[in-house]
Image (cartoon, helix red, strand yellow):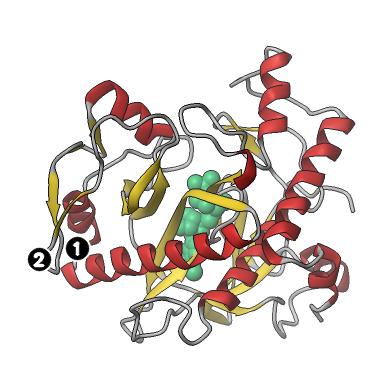
Amino acid sequence: MAAVTTISLPGLTKIATGKVREMFVDEADKSSLLFVATDRISAYDVVLENGVPNKAAVLTQLTAYWFSVLTQPGALAGQTTPLSTHLLSLTPGPTALLSEAERAILRGRCMRVRRLKMFPVEAIVRGYLAGSAFAEYSTKGTVHGEPAGVADASANGSSTIRFPLGMVRCQKLPAPVYTPSTKAELGAHDENISRAQAAELIGNPAHAARIEELALAVYTAAAEHALKRGVIIADTKFEFGLDEETGEVVLADEVLTPDSSRFWVADQYEAGREQDSLDKQFLRDWLVREGLKGKEGVTMPADIVEQTSKRYTDVYERLTGQTLESALAKIE
Ligand code: ATP
Ligand code: MG
């Protein structure tokens, strides 16, 4: 299947375009959204000119897989209220406003979702000290502004050191930590913030506490699941929204995908050095080799596109234990 980098659905109203997704609403039913992934890919914060076949299907079907695993009874340790997600269906639903050709393009890459009021934070959870968190730790001795080596009193009265002193690059943290960031507008960078700052942005302390609790519980369950399949989820980013009708805090967006997470091969993991990411490393290495890192307007040659697509599909298959074709075959 050829890569699709823009989606045009003249019968619907496009309400937003992100780096990867486009969102549409049907004027007749504004309570739900058509959430559509494109095959666009970014590396070093720049979106490449051409897309990666099957990437949208991997992101969408992997998110759907996680939603199904994580909403099983008992999936989240310590949670009495089950996880609620934004997914309504993996098809566009019975709208008369889409042609057969448009439905064919949307197949596998779209979700009908509850339209939520998104909280303006990225709920990052880290199991390992990598990326911007390690950079801050090694230069300033803090992580998201929190000093390393200092005990942090948790809500249940116990006190733990979230970031011990003397950690090396990519080292496993004593326990997963919630380290939120701001949600920057398109083109700007997210900023790492403290939990107190995140709570302020969220506005309601009960919502802030629920987001932290769910983010940690979802990460912990997923990391355990992935490790059994040979994949380390080093860190990940969730987005939550408020269902204004029910007052529920809902897990939205994409979850635990290669675009929102750092995935490492467990049996190649070694603390103290950079790890290869399971999907984008190949593309990043090519960009660096060609002197194209961070440049705008780059088109990938066919073999790089093909290899990158293969890696995304491979991540899907490792994590879910099924082929992408078999998942796609189940969608009506
Ligand atoms: P990136 O993911 O690379 O940081 P991005 O988030 O700007 O970029 P996309 O992932 O392409 O871009 O777009 C998804 C957008 O949809 C995000 O702004 C997200 O907050 C929003 N969103 C996700 N789920 C819902 C929902 N159920 N209701 C309303 N908005 C949603
Ligand atoms: Mg996004």
Quarter of the rendering occupied by the C terminus: bottom right
Residue 27 seen: no
Q: Is residue 18 left or right of residue 121?
A: right
Label 1: few (<14), some (14–19) or many (≥20) C-alpha neighbours in 10 Å: few
Callout 1 secondary element: loop
Amino acid type at circle 2 is Gly
Amino acid type at circle 1 is Gly
Q: Quadrant of residue 90?
A: bottom right
Q: Residue at x 79, y 68 (%)?
A: 107
Q: CA distance from mark 2 to mark 1?
A: 23 Å
Q: Is residue 320 above or below residue 195?
A: below
Q: How far across and down, in percent of the image, does residue 22 sit?
A: 61, 56
Q: Quadrant of residue 199?
A: bottom left
Label 2: few (<14), some (14–19) or many (≥20) C-alpha neighbours in 10 Å: few
Q: Residue at x 45, y 53 (%)?
A: 237
Q: In the image, which disc is placed on residue 141?
A: none
Q: Which residue is mark 2?
A: 157
Q: How far across and down, in percent of the image, does residue 309 sit?
A: 80, 45
**First-in-chain label (2 vs 1):** 2
Q: 142 or 98, which lies in front?
A: 142
Q: Is residue 157 left or right of residue 328?
A: left
Q: Is residue 115 left or right of residue 152?
A: right
Q: Is residue 320 above or below residue 295?
A: below
Q: Which residue is mark 1?
A: 203
Q: How far across and down, in percent of the image, does residue 13 sit?
A: 61, 65
Callout 2 secondary element: loop
